[in-house]
Image (tube, rainbow, N blue to C red):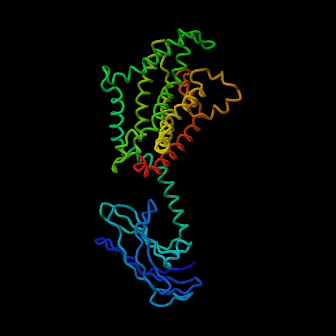
Amino acid sequence: MSTSYVILHVKLDPDSRAVHAEFIVRNFTQETWTAAEGFGVGYHLFDADTGTLIVDGPRVQPERDVKPGETMAVRMDFELPAEDGRYQVLLSPMRENVCWYYEKGGPFVLVEAATLRGVTTMGRARVGTNQTLQRERLWRGAGRALVYPFLTIWRNRSLIRVMVRRDVLGRYRGSFGGSFWTVMNPLLLMLTYFYVFGFILNSKFPGDPSRTGFALYYLAGMLPWLAFSEAVGRSPSVMLEHRNFVKKLVFAVETLPVDLVVAGLVSEVFAIILYCVFLLVVGHPVPPAALWLPVLVIPQLLFTAGLSWFLAALGVFVRDLGQILGYLLTIWFFATPICYPEDSLPRYLLPLASKNPIYILVRGYRDIFLHHHAPQFPSLWKLWVLSAVVFILGHAWFYKLRKSFADII
Protein backbone atom coordinates (compact mmCIF):
# COMPACT_ATOMS: atom_id res chain seq x y z
CA MET A 1 0.00 0.00 0.00
CA SER A 2 2.22 2.77 -1.30
CA THR A 3 1.75 6.49 -0.84
CA SER A 4 3.94 9.56 -0.97
CA TYR A 5 3.79 12.85 0.93
CA VAL A 6 4.65 16.48 0.59
CA ILE A 7 4.71 18.13 4.02
CA LEU A 8 3.55 21.73 3.75
CA HIS A 9 3.23 22.97 7.30
CA VAL A 10 3.38 21.53 10.84
CA LYS A 11 3.15 24.01 13.70
CA LEU A 12 2.80 23.69 17.47
CA ASP A 13 0.94 26.14 19.69
CA PRO A 14 2.93 25.80 22.96
CA ASP A 15 0.15 27.32 25.07
CA SER A 16 -2.58 24.90 24.05
CA ARG A 17 -0.26 22.04 22.97
CA ALA A 18 -2.29 21.91 19.74
CA VAL A 19 -0.57 20.92 16.49
CA HIS A 20 -1.79 22.00 13.08
CA ALA A 21 -0.51 19.87 10.18
CA GLU A 22 -0.93 20.38 6.44
CA PHE A 23 0.40 17.96 3.85
CA ILE A 24 -0.38 16.41 0.49
CA VAL A 25 -0.69 12.65 0.11
CA ARG A 26 -0.56 10.90 -3.25
CA ASN A 27 -2.47 7.65 -3.83
CA PHE A 28 -0.14 5.08 -5.39
CA THR A 29 -2.43 2.13 -4.60
CA GLN A 30 -4.75 0.34 -7.02
CA GLU A 31 -7.84 1.55 -5.15
CA THR A 32 -9.87 4.71 -5.39
CA TRP A 33 -10.20 6.44 -2.05
CA THR A 34 -13.85 7.34 -1.40
CA ALA A 35 -15.46 8.51 1.81
CA ALA A 36 -18.41 6.18 1.27
CA GLU A 37 -16.12 3.14 1.51
CA GLY A 38 -14.45 4.33 4.72
CA PHE A 39 -11.24 5.78 3.28
CA GLY A 40 -9.65 8.70 5.09
CA VAL A 41 -6.55 10.01 6.81
CA GLY A 42 -6.21 9.72 10.59
CA TYR A 43 -3.59 9.79 13.32
CA HIS A 44 -2.34 7.55 16.11
CA LEU A 45 -0.53 9.07 19.09
CA PHE A 46 1.97 6.76 20.79
CA ASP A 47 4.15 6.87 23.88
CA ALA A 48 7.58 6.87 22.23
CA ASP A 49 9.34 4.97 25.03
CA THR A 50 6.88 2.09 25.42
CA GLY A 51 5.13 2.04 22.04
CA THR A 52 1.74 2.24 23.78
CA LEU A 53 -1.13 3.66 21.73
CA ILE A 54 -2.59 6.63 23.62
CA VAL A 55 -5.00 8.28 21.16
CA ASP A 56 -6.79 6.96 18.09
CA GLY A 57 -7.68 10.32 16.55
CA PRO A 58 -10.54 11.43 14.27
CA ARG A 59 -10.37 10.94 10.49
CA VAL A 60 -10.21 13.45 7.68
CA GLN A 61 -12.25 12.04 4.80
CA PRO A 62 -11.60 12.93 1.15
CA GLU A 63 -13.90 15.61 -0.22
CA ARG A 64 -13.86 13.84 -3.57
CA ASP A 65 -12.80 10.47 -4.94
CA VAL A 66 -9.02 10.13 -5.05
CA LYS A 67 -8.07 7.84 -7.90
CA PRO A 68 -4.72 6.03 -8.21
CA GLY A 69 -2.01 8.57 -8.96
CA GLU A 70 -4.06 11.54 -7.69
CA THR A 71 -3.37 13.63 -4.60
CA MET A 72 -5.35 14.67 -1.54
CA ALA A 73 -4.74 17.80 0.54
CA VAL A 74 -5.00 17.12 4.28
CA ARG A 75 -5.42 19.59 7.11
CA MET A 76 -5.41 18.05 10.54
CA ASP A 77 -5.39 19.32 14.13
CA PHE A 78 -4.52 17.30 17.23
CA GLU A 79 -3.49 17.96 20.82
CA LEU A 80 -0.42 16.60 22.58
CA PRO A 81 -0.67 15.23 26.17
CA ALA A 82 0.08 17.47 29.14
CA GLU A 83 1.84 14.65 31.02
CA ASP A 84 5.63 14.49 30.86
CA GLY A 85 6.91 12.07 28.24
CA ARG A 86 8.06 11.55 24.67
CA TYR A 87 5.39 11.13 21.99
CA GLN A 88 5.12 10.10 18.36
CA VAL A 89 2.16 10.95 16.13
CA LEU A 90 1.67 8.87 12.98
CA LEU A 91 -0.54 10.46 10.30
CA SER A 92 -1.54 7.90 7.69
CA PRO A 93 -4.27 6.94 5.21
CA MET A 94 -6.60 4.24 6.46
CA ARG A 95 -9.80 2.41 5.67
CA GLU A 96 -12.32 2.12 8.49
CA ASN A 97 -12.57 -1.38 9.97
CA VAL A 98 -10.12 -2.69 7.36
CA CYS A 99 -6.58 -1.40 7.93
CA TRP A 100 -4.19 1.46 8.47
CA TYR A 101 -1.78 1.81 5.59
CA TYR A 102 1.20 2.34 7.88
CA GLU A 103 0.50 -1.03 9.55
CA LYS A 104 0.84 -2.65 6.13
CA GLY A 105 4.30 -1.17 5.65
CA GLY A 106 3.31 2.05 3.93
CA PRO A 107 4.97 5.42 4.71
CA PHE A 108 3.39 8.01 7.00
CA VAL A 109 3.95 11.52 8.30
CA LEU A 110 5.74 11.34 11.65
CA VAL A 111 5.53 14.14 14.21
CA GLU A 112 7.71 13.78 17.31
CA ALA A 113 7.21 15.82 20.47
CA ALA A 114 8.04 15.84 24.16
CA THR A 115 6.54 17.30 27.31
CA LEU A 116 8.77 18.12 30.27
CA ARG A 117 7.56 19.92 33.40
CA GLY A 118 4.48 21.12 31.57
CA VAL A 119 6.41 22.55 28.60
CA THR A 120 5.77 20.89 25.23
CA THR A 121 8.30 21.02 22.40
CA MET A 122 8.07 19.50 18.94
CA GLY A 123 10.78 17.99 16.78
CA ARG A 124 10.86 18.05 13.02
CA ALA A 125 8.06 16.48 11.02
CA ARG A 126 9.20 13.88 8.51
CA VAL A 127 8.08 10.94 6.43
CA GLY A 128 8.83 7.56 7.99
CA THR A 129 8.02 3.86 7.87
CA ASN A 130 7.63 1.14 10.47
CA GLN A 131 11.03 -0.21 9.47
CA THR A 132 12.77 3.10 10.19
CA LEU A 133 10.95 3.41 13.54
CA GLN A 134 11.94 -0.11 14.53
CA ARG A 135 15.58 0.61 13.71
CA GLU A 136 15.48 3.83 15.72
CA ARG A 137 13.82 2.09 18.67
CA LEU A 138 16.41 -0.65 18.51
CA TRP A 139 19.25 1.88 18.66
CA ARG A 140 17.55 3.82 21.47
CA GLY A 141 16.88 0.60 23.34
CA ALA A 142 20.50 -0.47 23.01
CA GLY A 143 21.63 2.94 24.27
CA ARG A 144 19.26 2.82 27.23
CA ALA A 145 20.33 -0.73 28.05
CA LEU A 146 23.93 0.43 28.33
CA VAL A 147 23.24 3.60 30.29
CA TYR A 148 20.14 2.96 32.42
CA PRO A 149 21.68 0.46 34.89
CA PHE A 150 24.35 2.96 35.88
CA LEU A 151 21.89 5.88 35.90
CA THR A 152 19.56 3.88 38.13
CA ILE A 153 22.28 3.38 40.72
CA TRP A 154 23.58 6.95 40.50
CA ARG A 155 20.20 8.67 40.70
CA ASN A 156 19.09 6.52 43.63
CA ARG A 157 22.40 6.42 45.49
CA SER A 158 20.91 8.15 48.55
CA LEU A 159 18.03 5.68 48.66
CA ILE A 160 20.43 2.75 48.28
CA ARG A 161 22.58 4.08 51.13
CA VAL A 162 19.56 4.37 53.43
CA MET A 163 18.22 0.93 52.49
CA VAL A 164 21.60 -0.75 52.95
CA ARG A 165 22.05 0.85 56.38
CA ARG A 166 18.56 -0.29 57.29
CA ASP A 167 19.28 -3.82 56.08
CA VAL A 168 22.63 -4.19 57.85
CA LEU A 169 21.42 -2.75 61.15
CA GLY A 170 18.06 -4.51 60.92
CA ARG A 171 19.67 -7.94 60.98
CA TYR A 172 20.88 -7.44 64.52
CA ARG A 173 18.16 -5.16 65.87
CA GLY A 174 17.21 -6.26 69.37
CA SER A 175 20.43 -8.23 69.95
CA PHE A 176 22.89 -7.29 72.69
CA GLY A 177 25.78 -6.87 70.25
CA GLY A 178 23.82 -4.78 67.75
CA SER A 179 25.82 -3.69 64.70
CA PHE A 180 28.98 -5.05 66.37
CA TRP A 181 27.95 -8.43 64.92
CA THR A 182 28.86 -7.07 61.48
CA VAL A 183 32.48 -7.46 62.59
CA MET A 184 32.01 -10.45 64.89
CA ASN A 185 30.42 -12.72 62.29
CA PRO A 186 33.36 -12.77 59.83
CA LEU A 187 35.81 -12.87 62.77
CA LEU A 188 34.16 -15.93 64.32
CA LEU A 189 33.94 -17.53 60.88
CA MET A 190 37.67 -17.11 60.31
CA LEU A 191 38.56 -18.44 63.75
CA THR A 192 36.31 -21.45 63.20
CA TYR A 193 37.91 -22.33 59.85
CA PHE A 194 41.38 -21.80 61.28
CA TYR A 195 40.60 -24.19 64.12
CA VAL A 196 38.94 -26.81 61.91
CA PHE A 197 41.52 -26.90 59.12
CA GLY A 198 44.57 -26.07 61.20
CA PHE A 199 44.01 -28.22 64.31
CA ILE A 200 41.25 -30.76 63.79
CA LEU A 201 41.81 -31.77 60.14
CA ASN A 202 45.44 -30.65 60.20
CA SER A 203 45.13 -29.81 56.48
CA LYS A 204 48.37 -28.74 54.89
CA PHE A 205 49.71 -27.89 51.47
CA PRO A 206 52.79 -29.58 50.05
CA GLY A 207 55.69 -27.31 50.89
CA ASP A 208 53.71 -25.44 53.56
CA PRO A 209 53.91 -27.35 56.88
CA SER A 210 52.26 -24.55 58.90
CA ARG A 211 48.79 -24.96 60.41
CA THR A 212 47.66 -21.69 58.90
CA GLY A 213 48.46 -22.44 55.24
CA PHE A 214 45.24 -24.16 54.27
CA ALA A 215 43.11 -21.87 56.45
CA LEU A 216 44.51 -18.82 54.66
CA TYR A 217 43.93 -20.51 51.31
CA TYR A 218 40.34 -21.39 52.20
CA LEU A 219 39.48 -17.97 53.66
CA ALA A 220 40.88 -16.14 50.62
CA GLY A 221 38.46 -18.09 48.46
CA MET A 222 35.57 -17.41 50.81
CA LEU A 223 35.97 -13.63 50.61
CA PRO A 224 34.26 -13.19 47.22
CA TRP A 225 31.95 -16.18 47.69
CA LEU A 226 30.30 -14.92 50.89
CA ALA A 227 29.37 -11.55 49.37
CA PHE A 228 28.18 -13.16 46.13
CA SER A 229 26.12 -15.95 47.70
CA GLU A 230 24.54 -13.60 50.26
CA ALA A 231 23.16 -11.25 47.60
CA VAL A 232 22.20 -13.89 45.03
CA GLY A 233 20.67 -16.20 47.64
CA ARG A 234 18.36 -13.45 48.94
CA SER A 235 17.44 -11.94 45.60
CA PRO A 236 14.54 -14.28 44.60
CA SER A 237 12.52 -13.18 47.64
CA VAL A 238 13.52 -9.51 47.84
CA MET A 239 10.48 -8.26 45.90
CA LEU A 240 8.10 -10.29 48.06
CA GLU A 241 9.77 -9.09 51.26
CA HIS A 242 9.28 -5.48 50.15
CA ARG A 243 5.85 -5.87 48.57
CA ASN A 244 4.71 -2.59 50.15
CA PHE A 245 7.44 -0.73 48.27
CA VAL A 246 6.65 -2.56 45.03
CA LYS A 247 3.06 -1.29 45.11
CA LYS A 248 4.20 2.32 45.51
CA LEU A 249 4.31 4.01 42.14
CA VAL A 250 7.10 6.42 43.11
CA PHE A 251 9.51 3.84 44.55
CA ALA A 252 12.47 2.73 42.43
CA VAL A 253 12.03 -1.04 42.86
CA GLU A 254 15.10 -1.74 40.72
CA THR A 255 17.25 -0.57 43.66
CA LEU A 256 16.12 -3.44 45.92
CA PRO A 257 18.45 -6.07 44.37
CA VAL A 258 21.25 -3.48 44.38
CA ASP A 259 20.71 -3.04 48.13
CA LEU A 260 21.53 -6.72 48.62
CA VAL A 261 24.70 -6.41 46.57
CA VAL A 262 25.94 -3.38 48.50
CA ALA A 263 25.02 -4.99 51.83
CA GLY A 264 27.09 -8.01 50.83
CA LEU A 265 29.95 -5.69 49.91
CA VAL A 266 29.82 -4.11 53.38
CA SER A 267 30.20 -7.54 54.96
CA GLU A 268 33.06 -8.36 52.58
CA VAL A 269 34.92 -5.15 53.42
CA PHE A 270 34.93 -6.07 57.10
CA ALA A 271 35.98 -9.62 56.20
CA ILE A 272 38.90 -8.33 54.07
CA ILE A 273 40.06 -6.07 56.90
CA LEU A 274 39.96 -8.96 59.36
CA TYR A 275 41.71 -11.22 56.85
CA CYS A 276 44.55 -8.69 56.56
CA VAL A 277 44.77 -8.57 60.36
CA PHE A 278 44.85 -12.36 60.41
CA LEU A 279 47.70 -12.32 57.89
CA LEU A 280 49.71 -10.02 60.14
CA VAL A 281 48.99 -12.11 63.25
CA VAL A 282 50.32 -15.31 61.65
CA GLY A 283 53.39 -13.55 60.27
CA HIS A 284 52.36 -12.88 56.67
CA PRO A 285 52.68 -9.29 55.47
CA VAL A 286 49.78 -7.59 53.71
CA PRO A 287 51.04 -7.57 50.12
CA PRO A 288 51.26 -4.39 48.03
CA ALA A 289 49.36 -6.40 45.41
CA ALA A 290 46.24 -5.69 47.50
CA LEU A 291 46.00 -2.47 45.48
CA TRP A 292 44.73 -4.70 42.64
CA LEU A 293 41.59 -5.56 44.60
CA PRO A 294 39.35 -3.01 42.80
CA VAL A 295 39.91 -4.74 39.44
CA LEU A 296 38.32 -7.84 41.02
CA VAL A 297 35.68 -6.19 43.19
CA ILE A 298 34.16 -4.10 40.36
CA PRO A 299 33.37 -7.04 38.02
CA GLN A 300 32.28 -9.03 41.06
CA LEU A 301 29.71 -6.34 41.88
CA LEU A 302 28.56 -6.04 38.26
CA PHE A 303 28.12 -9.80 37.91
CA THR A 304 26.33 -10.11 41.26
CA ALA A 305 24.02 -7.16 40.52
CA GLY A 306 23.08 -8.48 37.08
CA LEU A 307 22.33 -11.93 38.43
CA SER A 308 20.41 -10.45 41.38
CA TRP A 309 18.24 -8.33 39.05
CA PHE A 310 17.48 -11.42 36.95
CA LEU A 311 16.62 -13.63 39.93
CA ALA A 312 14.63 -10.90 41.71
CA ALA A 313 12.36 -10.49 38.68
CA LEU A 314 12.06 -14.23 38.10
CA GLY A 315 11.32 -14.84 41.79
CA VAL A 316 8.08 -12.84 41.49
CA PHE A 317 6.72 -15.42 39.03
CA VAL A 318 8.44 -18.58 40.35
CA ARG A 319 7.91 -18.68 44.11
CA ASP A 320 9.96 -21.89 44.52
CA LEU A 321 13.05 -20.24 43.05
CA GLY A 322 14.53 -19.49 46.48
CA GLN A 323 14.54 -23.18 47.47
CA ILE A 324 15.90 -24.26 44.09
CA LEU A 325 18.58 -21.59 44.16
CA GLY A 326 19.83 -22.70 47.58
CA TYR A 327 20.57 -26.13 46.14
CA LEU A 328 22.18 -24.65 43.01
CA LEU A 329 24.43 -22.39 45.10
CA THR A 330 25.59 -25.43 47.08
CA ILE A 331 26.53 -27.17 43.82
CA TRP A 332 28.24 -23.99 42.59
CA PHE A 333 30.23 -23.77 45.84
CA PHE A 334 31.58 -27.30 45.59
CA ALA A 335 32.18 -26.96 41.85
CA THR A 336 34.52 -24.06 42.65
CA PRO A 337 37.89 -24.93 44.29
CA ILE A 338 37.25 -23.01 47.49
CA CYS A 339 37.46 -25.73 50.12
CA TYR A 340 39.88 -27.93 48.23
CA PRO A 341 43.13 -27.29 46.30
CA GLU A 342 42.85 -26.28 42.67
CA ASP A 343 45.35 -29.01 41.75
CA SER A 344 42.88 -31.66 42.87
CA LEU A 345 40.57 -30.87 39.97
CA PRO A 346 40.71 -33.52 37.22
CA ARG A 347 42.55 -32.26 34.16
CA TYR A 348 39.52 -32.66 31.92
CA LEU A 349 37.53 -30.31 34.18
CA LEU A 350 40.05 -27.48 34.08
CA PRO A 351 38.72 -25.94 30.81
CA LEU A 352 35.21 -25.99 32.28
CA ALA A 353 36.36 -24.52 35.60
CA SER A 354 38.07 -21.65 33.80
CA LYS A 355 34.62 -20.58 32.51
CA ASN A 356 33.35 -20.26 36.08
CA PRO A 357 33.39 -16.53 37.00
CA ILE A 358 33.56 -17.30 40.72
CA TYR A 359 36.61 -19.49 40.12
CA ILE A 360 38.30 -16.56 38.37
CA LEU A 361 37.48 -14.32 41.35
CA VAL A 362 38.66 -16.88 43.90
CA ARG A 363 41.92 -17.40 42.05
CA GLY A 364 42.37 -13.63 41.72
CA TYR A 365 41.94 -13.08 45.48
CA ARG A 366 44.49 -15.83 46.18
CA ASP A 367 46.92 -14.38 43.65
CA ILE A 368 46.76 -11.06 45.51
CA PHE A 369 46.85 -12.19 49.15
CA LEU A 370 48.82 -15.43 48.99
CA HIS A 371 51.00 -15.20 45.89
CA HIS A 372 51.57 -11.44 46.09
CA HIS A 373 50.99 -10.61 42.43
CA ALA A 374 48.28 -9.18 40.20
CA PRO A 375 45.41 -11.37 38.94
CA GLN A 376 46.00 -13.20 35.69
CA PHE A 377 45.05 -10.87 32.83
CA PRO A 378 43.83 -13.50 30.29
CA SER A 379 41.10 -14.55 32.72
CA LEU A 380 40.52 -11.07 34.11
CA TRP A 381 39.43 -9.38 30.88
CA LYS A 382 37.00 -12.22 30.16
CA LEU A 383 35.54 -11.73 33.64
CA TRP A 384 35.07 -8.01 32.97
CA VAL A 385 33.30 -8.66 29.67
CA LEU A 386 31.05 -11.36 31.14
CA SER A 387 30.21 -9.22 34.17
CA ALA A 388 29.30 -6.20 32.02
CA VAL A 389 27.05 -8.35 29.79
CA VAL A 390 25.31 -9.98 32.77
CA PHE A 391 24.89 -6.57 34.43
CA ILE A 392 23.23 -5.02 31.36
CA LEU A 393 21.08 -8.03 30.46
CA GLY A 394 20.01 -8.54 34.08
CA HIS A 395 18.81 -4.96 34.34
CA ALA A 396 17.04 -5.19 30.95
CA TRP A 397 15.22 -8.35 32.12
CA PHE A 398 14.18 -6.69 35.38
CA TYR A 399 13.11 -3.48 33.59
CA LYS A 400 11.01 -5.48 31.14
CA LEU A 401 9.12 -7.40 33.82
CA ARG A 402 8.78 -4.84 36.59
CA LYS A 403 5.49 -3.39 35.27
CA SER A 404 3.68 -6.61 36.18
CA PHE A 405 5.15 -6.95 39.71
CA ALA A 406 2.40 -5.00 41.48
CA ASP A 407 -0.36 -7.06 39.84
CA ILE A 408 1.22 -10.41 40.69
CA ILE A 409 2.44 -9.58 44.20
Give the camera-side residue of 405 and 73. Answer: 405
Which residue lies at the image location 38% right of the left edge and 22% below the top edge?
A: 183
Asked if residue 262 is positioned above or below residue 122 in the image, the reply reads above
Q: Total marks drawn?
A: 0
Which residue lies at the image location 46% right of the left edge and 17% below the top edge?
A: 190
In the picture, the quarter occupied by the N terminus is bottom right
Left or right? Give the position of 363 relative to 322.
right
User: Where's residue 328, x and y in %?
Assistant: 56, 33
Residue furthest out toward the left: 15
Residue furthest out toward the right: 348
Left or right? Give the position of 63 relative to 160.
right
Residue furthest out toward the bottom: 64
User: Where's residue 26, x and y in %?
Assistant: 52, 84
Give the camera-side residue of 138 and 310. Answer: 310
Asked if residue 234 is positioned above or below residue 200 in the image, the reply reads below
Give the camera-side residue of 98 and 331. Answer: 98
Which residue lies at the image location 45% right of the left edge and 46% below the top edge?
A: 149
User: Where's residue 293, x and y in %?
Assistant: 49, 29
Tell me where residue 179 sits by quadrant. top left
Which residue lies at the image location 37% right of the left edge and 46% below the top edge?
A: 246
User: Where's residue 121, x and y in %?
Assistant: 35, 67
